[in-house]
Image (cartoon, helix red, strand yellow):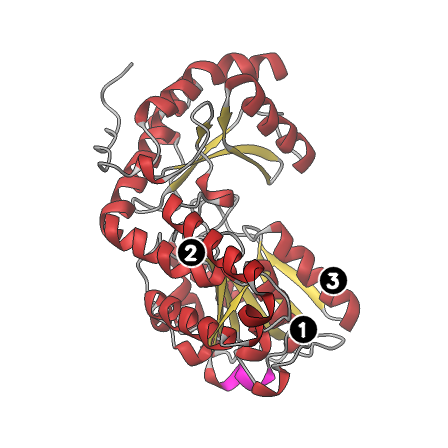
Amino acid sequence: MSTTGPRPPEPIPGARLLFSLDPGVVHLNHGSYGAVPIPVQRTQQRLRDEAEANPMRFFARGLVDRIAHARRHIAAFLGADPDGTALVGNVTIGVGIVLQSLRLGPGDEVLCTDHGYGAVALAVDREARRTGAVRRTLTVPLQATDEEIIEIVRSGLRPGRTKLLIVDHLTSSTARLFPATAIVAAARERGVPVLVDAAHAPGMLPIPVGTIGADFWVGNLHKWAYAPRGTAALVVAPQWRQRIEPLAVSWQQEAGFPLRVEWQATLDYTSWLAAPVGVYTLRTLGAERVRTHNAQLAAYGQWVVGQALGVAPADLPNPGGPMVSMRILPLPAGLATTIADATALRERIGDELGVDVAINAWRGRGWLRLSGQVYNRADEYERLAEGLPALLARHV
């Protein structure tokens, strides 16, 4: 194997032992569902035990204050205003809350890009059917420069008609890092509000939410901030907070934002209450150290698998830049060109090679996405590289 590519980072001592992942499987897809450290799992289980020991006491005495305490901790970690931050189940729920709160009408449009997450597009389409609004999608080249992206977005805005611009900070299908702060500024010049889909930002991108300036920002903490699944934050600018309505009304409706969004009766709130322990775990390992390790490991994985697939180093896409912990590789033409085919190929790789990866269909081509996380090792990517070419050849 060539030694001219990027070198893997040194493992962070003890980090691998923080996770209860099946050692018989190579987990190279942290970006989809994350992995919860054992201390966080145990904290959440203790909270569940507390709830089951006395449900009345758990739900009816002080739970609202405990949620607010967790929210303040998470908002501080994100660099967000705690009074403008609401905890929600995931990014898609946050997007749904924003869409239904905008009060769209016939002729209004929601502007997206073709890098956006599929479930977000489905949410926009549902709201469009309800209200008579439309979704319009901008085409952004994978390797476009930041300046080109800003100009594409600026040219696509229709002041007066575009009621919301939705832009990813870091995209799921293409691992593309968008210049979110500059895009928000360009949209503000034209009076268009912006929702930043920051599903992958918390824990990976060290960018304070407050500096982005978006009208709406929503990010998951279960991916890169080690929180239990079902933990996300919706951050809303002051001028919009009174308009935000929950998807379902419950007993804190009259309390206003954020409580009216957070309180959903007998929801399992233990993921939110345990989330600060995930943040603590990240800080204990060293957030910058973790980010650097993960990005370097993802780059190594992309290179070693790319070599195995015959992708020239110069052709390895890197739309996220050097500090992003996910990398993508183009699959041979004709493979995984639809969502169904991508799902089937992902499952074959898992079943036949014992390796979990992400496979996405984007613009009629299949793409393999690799993540880097502190529990991964260089030889895991090498294992994928060794077995993948023959597997793909069998399924062309």
Q: Which residue is mark 3?
A: 126
What residue span does the magenta drawing correspond to?
A: 239-243
Q: Amino acid at mark 1?
A: Gln
Q: Earlier in the sequence, mark 2 or mark 3?
A: 3
User: Residue 242 colored magenta?
Assistant: yes
Q: Percent from the top left, x then y, of residue 309?
A: 44, 19
Is there any visible trace of residue 197 in the rendered image? no
In front: 329, or 247? Answer: 247
Q: CB atoms at circles 2 and 3 under 8 Å apart?
A: no
Q: Earlier in the sequence, mark 3 or mark 1?
A: 1
Residues under labels 1 and 2: Cα distance?
Answer: 25 Å
In front: 332, or 120? Answer: 120
Please determine whether, in this image, residue 42 is positioned above or below residue 245.
above
Helix, strand or loop status at disc 1? helix
Q: Which residue is mark 1?
A: 100
Q: Percent from the top left, x then y, of residue 212?
A: 38, 69
Helix, strand or loop status at disc 3? helix
Is there any visible trace of residue 183 in the rendered image? yes
Q: Amino acid at mark 3?
A: Arg
Q: Main secondary structure of the magenta part?
A: helix
Image quarter where the N terminus lies is: top left
Helix, strand or loop status at disc 2? loop
Q: Which residue is mark 2?
A: 178
Residues under labels 2 and 3: Cα distance?
Answer: 25 Å
Q: Which mark is residue 278?
A: none
Residue plotted at (30% across, 58% down): 206
